[in-house]
Amino acid sequence: MSAPRSIPISRPSFSDEEWQAVRETLESGWIIQGPRVKAFEEAFARRHRVQHAVAASSGTTALHLALQALDVGPGDEVIVPAFTWVATANAVLYAGATPVFVDVCEGTYNIDCAQIPAALNSRTRAVIPVHLFGLCADMRSLGSVVPAEVRVIEDAACAAGAACHGTPAGAQGHVACFSFHPRKSITTGEGGMILTADPAVARRIRQLRNHGLREAEPGALPPPRTQLAEVDVLGFNYRLTDVQAAIGLVQLAKLDQFIVERAEWACWYARELADIPWLRMPDRPDHYDHAWQSFVVVVAEDAPLLRDDLMARLQEKGIATRPGTHAIPELAYYRARFGFRRDQFPVASRLLARSMAIPLHNRMTPDDYRYVVEALHAF
């Protein structure tokens, strides 16, 4: 009897190159933040055409560092899309500021820029557009409605390698934050990266991520010294390790090929599933280079099964799925703290109930993709 089929929602794509990179790092004896972190930062900055990159321990800590470096804090408000992973809003709370939610667009799942002006006021210090599932937010429209004094922090957690009108994700705001969680296109296990064109912001982020220590040459091996480095700000231990950076360097070299493969299969999914009337495909706007971190569909009200029942039936067939992401204002903590109603952000609410990510990753075979499509057609 053949083994039951099992297709995970995501799976990192590693080879002997990552193993060798880790081995070389371990054998070097330098495994904490050091020369490989610096090399990873420089390579990531070049790929996204931004001058400065600072590695962090996660995408969440990257967001926290960005907010801290921009002096966002108590009394300030930060505009956040209502449909995104909870970390986007949590980081605002870590900084002591208040998240102000704006609903999203039905087809792209990204922040609805037309609703931003109503959320602006004298306390607004920043807006965090999220490039959800690998598709850049509408940064041109956002730029036309956000005042110059309001900082734009790209949450590009899902968007390594993505672009909009030829400009890479990470080069469209004042600061940008990426994640290398295993569900992302490239991974270091956990890890994050911050990009900025502002050298002063980059220096401040480097200091904040390392306990507030003032270091002469970030990423370099420290020289012998008789005095400990000075601390003149409250910092954090948000460093990436050289072991993780070694993996990241190998993964980054594969990023473009990973995206090409994902894009080909995303187009195939859209074509092969187009005849299912109760399954809406994600929008793919012109002049956007989608990174396809996830392929997220929406199950219509007239579907033969409720979204959750459909997910359960697919799991029985060995096909893993996930709801798209959070409608943050509907999470218990945010409802209790801020008094949000469940229907306050209607698009985010609908997407919470009906969105479904189906498997799309670089370890899938053509037979795996065919099996997913056949299973959906069977309903």
Image: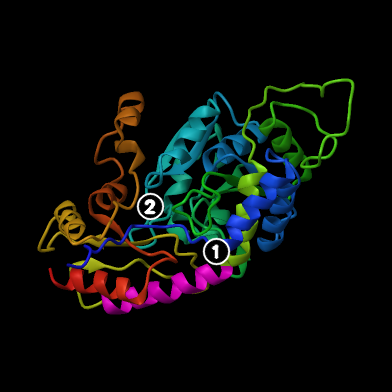
Q: Secondary structure at mark 1?
A: loop
Judge by depth and name the residue closer to the eye, 225 or 210.
Answer: 225
What quarter of the picture does the C terminus occupy?
Answer: bottom left
The numbered disc on residue 104 is 2
Check the image and report above or below for 375 versus 223. Answer: below
What count of labels does the image hold?
2
Residues drawn in magenta: 256-273
Residue drawn at (52%, 39%), measured in percent from left and top? 60
Residue drawn at (51%, 73%), measured in percent from left and top? 260
Report the mark closest to the observer, 1 or 2. Answer: 1
- Residue 55 in view (yes/no): yes
- Residue 170 in view (yes/no): no
Residue 270 part of the magenta segment: yes
Q: Please, what is the three-letter code of the amino acid marked with disc 2?
A: Val
Disc 1 and disc 2: Cα gap in Å? 19 Å
- Left or right: residue 203 versus residue 252 is right
- Quarter of the view holding residue 243: top right
Residue 44, how many percent across, how many down? 67, 56
Q: Return the residue at label 1.
A: 162
Q: Secondary structure at mark 2?
A: loop
Q: Please, what is the three-letter code of the amino acid marked with disc 1?
A: Ala
Residue 99, how many percent across, how many down? 46, 34
